[in-house]
Image (cartoon, grey):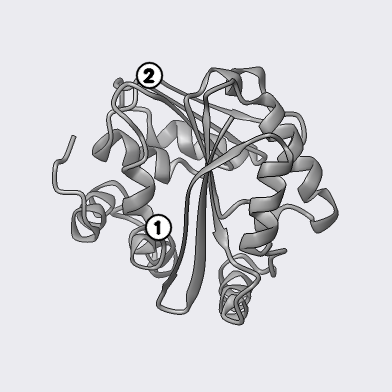
């Protein structure tokens, strides 16, 4: 594990893992920590905790946790079989910590999520259809075990800068998101029985982020 957790260290590490990435992939993978609060997110994992990543993609954030945190287990779920295959390939030479990635349907959260001490939902909620977001949050919080923490990081629809993220998603994901405001996200977490223990709004370049840490 590295001890120097900063953007330069993150970028150096990712460059060693994604040497063949093209220009667009390099921007999305290697340099994301420059526009998203990865450092504060990584620091939320306490040594020995079991950490889950909902919408884990190809496993990049989980990979950062192996290098810059000390989880005892990593678990990732994603709706795309191809992305889960990518994550398993990325972790093919990693033995510690133990890890598991699996496909889920985006609605029914696997039972294994209930074993996690901390769960991350990073820039995933705005990709959930707007009319399904409340049900998504409800099902997620119901699956959490008592005492577990949910870290919800997303783009704040309450900021006029949200349109920069919509342009970002249109360019990199060929879609525009269903961003939720900070206030609405906070309300939904509390309405589903979670206690907000940390909260932050931060603009990085033109991206209006919010992070909510909620405990069950």
Q: Residue 31 or 69: which is nearer the viewer?
A: 69
Q: Quadrant of residue 84?
A: top right
**Quadrant, the N terminus:** top left
- Depicted 110 relative to depicted 212: above or below: above
User: Residue 198 in the image: x percent, y percent?
Assistant: 46, 47
Position of 139 relative to 39 (above/below): above
Using the image as rendered, state which of residue 138 and residue 57 is in the foreground.
138
Residue on which the image places disc 2: 98
- Asked if residue 9 lies left or right of residue 173, the reply is left
Percent across and percent down for residue 35 are 40, 68
Disc 2 is placed on an element classified as loop
29 or 124: nearer the eye?
124
Residue matched to label 1: 29
State the residue at coordinates (31%, 43%): 43
Q: Would residue 208 appear left or right of 5 to someone viewing this image?
A: right
Residue pictured at 75% horizontal, 41% vertical: 136
How crowded pointer 1 is (Cα within 10 Å; few <14, some 14-19, many 20+) is rated as some
Sequence order check, earlier mark of 1 and 2? 1
């Amino acid at each position: 594990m590295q001890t120097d957790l900063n953007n330069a260290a993150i970028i150096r590490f990712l460059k060693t893992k994604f040497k063949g990435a093209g220009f667009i992939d390099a921007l999305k993978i290697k340099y994301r920590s420059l526009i998203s609060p990865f450092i504060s997110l990584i620091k939320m994992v306490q040594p020995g905790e079991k950490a889950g990543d909902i919408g884990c993609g190809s496993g990049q954030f989980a990979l950062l946790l192996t290098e810059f945190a000390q989880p005892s287990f990593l678990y990732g779920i994603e709706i795309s079989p191809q992305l889960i295959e990518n994550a398993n390939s990325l972790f093919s030479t990693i033995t510690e910590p133990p890890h598991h990635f699996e496909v889920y349907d985006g609605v029914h959260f696997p039972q294994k999520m209930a074993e996690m001490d901390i769960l991350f939902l990073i820039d995933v909620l705005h990709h959930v259809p707007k009319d399904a977001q409340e049900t998504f949050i409800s099902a997620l919080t119901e699956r959490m075990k008592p005492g577990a923490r949910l870290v919800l990081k997303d783009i704040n629809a309450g900021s006029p800068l949200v349109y920069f993220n919509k342009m970002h998603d249109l360019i990199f994901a060929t879609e525009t998101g269903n961003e939720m405001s900070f206030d609405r996200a906070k309300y939904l977490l509390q309405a589903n029985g979670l206690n907000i223990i940390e909260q932050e709004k931060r603009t990085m370049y033109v991206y209006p982020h919010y992070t909510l840490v909620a405990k069950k």
